[in-house]
Amino acid sequence: MTKRAYLYFFLTFIIGVAVGGWGVYYCAWRAGVWHRPWNENEAVHKLTQRLDLQPDQVKELRSILDDTVKKWREIQAQTKPQLEALHKQTDQRIRQMLNPEQQKRFDSLVRAHEKRAKH
């Protein structure tokens, strides 16, 4: 082979690795696999740097974020029972359409999902 053929092969390989890696990262991020929990201090730090906030603005920003987090948690607490009930109802409806063997496997999948959700 000529040097040009090797170069084309190498470039194709590198481009394939880059595109494939980006695709895996993008899909995993969209699926929520790699999301880190929200960190208020990190958010304040980033906004402070990017917006060149003054100390009084940082203090006000923290107050706004604290209030938002409090309201967010209140909304979650209010809707959590409804969401859990809907989830259980959905699981029951799915179980009804399955045969006994499928129900066992479905229950195993549900337990594995619940275990992952707790972590």
Image: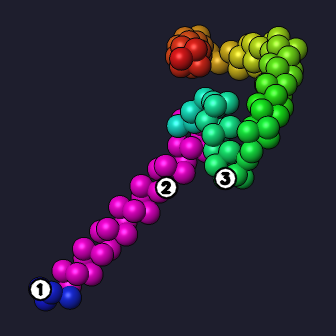
Q: Quadrant of the N terminus?
A: bottom left
Mark 2 vs 3, N-terminal side? 2
Say whether residue 29 is magenta.
yes
Marks 2 and 3 in Cβ contact (< 8 Å): no
Q: Please, what is the three-letter code of the amino acid marked with disc 1?
A: Met
* Image point (44%, 63%), residue name: 19
Relative to 1, residue 13 above or below: above
Magenta segment: 5-33
Callout 2: few (<14), some (14-19), or many (20+) C-alpha neighbours within 10 Å? few
Q: Is residue 101 visible?
A: no
Mark 1 vs 3, N-terminal side? 1
* Image point (61%, 36%), residue name: 42
Question: In this rendering, would 98 be left or right of 16?
Answer: right
Q: Which structural element holds mark 1?
A: loop
Question: In this rendering, would 107 be left or right of 4?
Answer: right
Q: Which structural element holds mark 3?
A: helix
Q: Which structural element holds mark 2?
A: helix
Residue marked by disc 3 = 50
Inter-mark Cα distance, 1 to 3: 51 Å
Q: Please, what is the three-letter code of the amino acid marked with disc 3?
A: Arg
Relative to 75, residue 46 above or below: below
Inter-mark Cα distance, 2 to 3: 28 Å
Question: In this rendering, would 94 be left or right of 23?
Answer: right
Callout 1: few (<14), some (14-19), or many (20+) C-alpha neighbours within 10 Å? few
Name the residue at the front extreme. Answer: 55
Marks 1 and 3 in Cβ contact (< 8 Å): no
The label on residue 9 is none
Q: Please, what is the three-letter code of the amino acid marked with disc 2?
A: Gly
Q: State which mark lies toward you, 2 or 1.
A: 2
